[in-house]
Image (cartoon, rainbow, N blue to C red):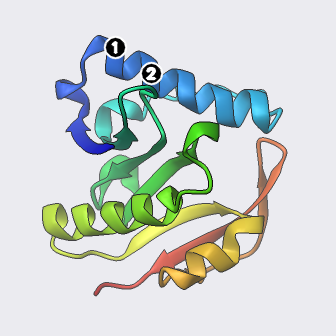
Amino acid sequence: MRWVIKPWQELERDELYAIMRARAEVFVVEQDCAYQDADGSDPAAVHLWATDDTTPVLAYARLFAPGAEGVAEARIGRVITTAPGRGRGLGRELMRRALTEIATRWAAPPVWIGAQKYLERFYGELGFVRCGDDYVEDGIDHLPMLRATD
């Protein structure tokens, strides 16, 4: 297995296709959530994912610099672990790598995430704390969470 991190401009066509397919598999098919995944934000993101010889995307997240798209904090979004990657600790490793990358690229800013509510404990174990009221996004309960600087 290997980890890849690339800004939008460096993504190869097949990498982008694999990312979009993996996001659709998890969010649209598995979670039965009809929404517009191609939201226009991918060009502003740095894309982080795990891959191996048989599965192009095992785990994935997109990272945003502080100030990107008018949000003061750095952000992590579209966090997924695909079916072949589950049960291997990749979600936790993905988040550790995402936080390290954000700290390295952007001098350890606070990090915001819109977490699915059932994952509050998982993100809490990574240092995130609730910073607002629950909300529904695309039919799924979420909550805003913030991780202070290291």
The reply to whether discs 2 and 1 touch (Cβ–Cβ < 8 Å) is yes
If the image is split into quadrants, where does the N terminus sit?
top left
Q: Left or right: 7 with respect to 118?
A: left
Could you say which is closer to the camera, residue 144 or residue 127? Answer: 127
Q: Which mark is residue 14?
A: 1
Q: Amino acid at mark 2?
A: Ala
Query: Vertical placement of 52 versus 54: above or below?
Result: below
Q: Give the tally of numbered discs.
A: 2
On the image, the x and y values in percent for residue 83 come to: 64, 39
Please tell me how crowded label 2 is: few (under 14), some (14-19), or many (20+) other residues with Cα within 10 Å.
some
If the image is split into quadrants, where does the C terminus sit?
bottom left
Q: Left or right: 81 with respect to 52?
A: right
The secondary element bearing badge 1 is classed as: helix
The quarter of the displayed image where residue 43 is located: top left
Residue in view at x 32 percent, y 62 percent: 97
The residue that mark 2 highlights is: 18
Residue in view at x 27 percent, y 75 percent: 109
The quarter of the displayed image where residue 117 is located: bottom right
On the image, the x and y values in percent for residue 72 come to: 36, 66
